[in-house]
Amino acid sequence: MYNNYITMSPENNLSSLESIVKPLLEAASTTHWRNSLNVLYLSGHVMAFSEELQFPCIISARGPYDEVESASDLLKGKTEVAITKIGKDSLPIIMPVITSLLKQEELRTALEEDREEKLVKIFIDLYSSQFQKMQDEFFQIFISGASTIADWITPELYENLLEMREKMIRSAFYDDEYEEMVDSLLKLNLIKPRLQINLCPRCADYQITLTKTATILENCPNCGVEWASVTLFTFIHPYNEIKKNNSDLPLFISSYLKHKIVTLYPAKELEIFPMAKVSLEDGTIFDIDVYIPEYDMGFECKVFEDAYARMTSSRINSLVGGLLPQIHRYFDAGIQKVFIVTNLVESSSNKVERLLKRKLSESGYPSEVELLAKDYDKLLKWLDEKAQLITNQRAKLFTKSLEIKNGPEKLE
Ligand SMILES: [Zn+2]
């Protein structure tokens, strides 16, 4: 059924997972929400909450979020004074305070619903090292009132979340496109808020909310100044699962192509396999991110963790070195057109494409590869072209088959 080189067992057809990216497919045909497609270019690994907690999250910051240094300094100062007083006790006493502080009940409900029990570890993971160091002092804080612990936690947590946000933006974004993407993802119900910290840059008043809806209160109730707020979002299930290993991009491409081809030419559905696991004659098994057997087309999706890093020649070499073995396998498998979708900026993608083509022809491989940079508008246009090309060929074949059946004169 496929070409002579490849076999693929039916249980490896993962097309059913395409329904998970349906909101993005719908957004692709809008003007205002299509910037949500930027999420496809964000590496699940960069979005992981921590090394141990590999669930992807998004951090949004609003208001004067980068002007709270003095407020956070004040809160920390207050805590410093409290913890220099004597006091001894241990972590077991502190932890219940922390958990009640963070409204454990709400947290538990949120977790049960999404089976993200790991979220509970968020706070513990973030702060346990500090707790260990300061356990004696914490008893004093404990008896002098939980608010002091909140005073201490708030700026720490706030800064941590901002740092995570910075990391994501640096990996593949310009500042404003990131926040626009967050807005659209929220409207599409692909993410939901979990935790919000509002901090007043003037009087250092604050709110920590475990929330399922982003807070509407925009100003500090104490002095009326605009809050600086940072919100932690997680992806809904099962999108969170496919985001972890960047499977959302291949699923989006395969579902978009299917949708487009059916719209252009509603004949028999064309087989397009996302994340196809195929085997070669020699027993090699490998993944083709998107595979169209009938047209010997293969799409490779590469979402780099540091797409915006400077393109030195050694970096280009290492990117190409990483891509080559996989592209060789595509050609070994009899695929004749290889398309590589990346999250690189255009100038970087051009450099990588040039070197990749040169290396391919030097090693006796065809150089029929196209590399696409991070730009969802171009990606859609490009996929439209592929769909059109396939449709034209299908229509031609169909006409030919009619001619054979009926004889050309009957078509006149
Ligand atoms: Zn205030």
Image (cartoon, rainbow, N blue to C red):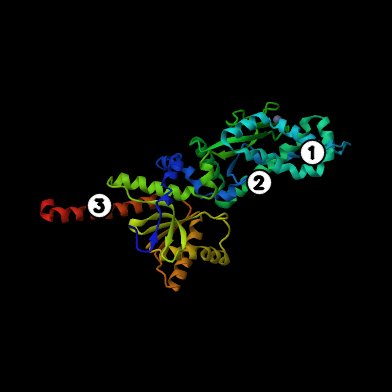
Image quadrant where residue 295 sits: bottom left
Q: Residue at x 73, y 32 (%)?
A: 203
Identify whether 236 is placed above or below 278. Answer: above
Instruction: Tell me what residue is drawn at x 35 percent, y 63 percent.
Output: 4
180, 110: nearer the viewer = 110
Residue 266 on image: x %, y %: 28, 45
Residue 257 shows in this picture: yes
Q: Nearer the viewer, residue 48 or 60?
A: 48
262 lies left or right of 328: left
Label 2: which secondary element: helix
Q: Which mark is residue 301?
A: none
Q: Earlier in the sequence, mark 2 or mark 3?
A: 2
Q: Nearer the viewer, mark 1 or mark 3?
A: 1
Q: Which residue is mark 2?
A: 163
Distance from Cα at disc 1 to Cα at disc 2:
27 Å
Q: Amino acid at mark 1?
A: Leu
Which residue lies under the disc numbered 1?
Answer: 91
Q: Are dots 1 and 3 in contact, CB under 8 Å?
A: no
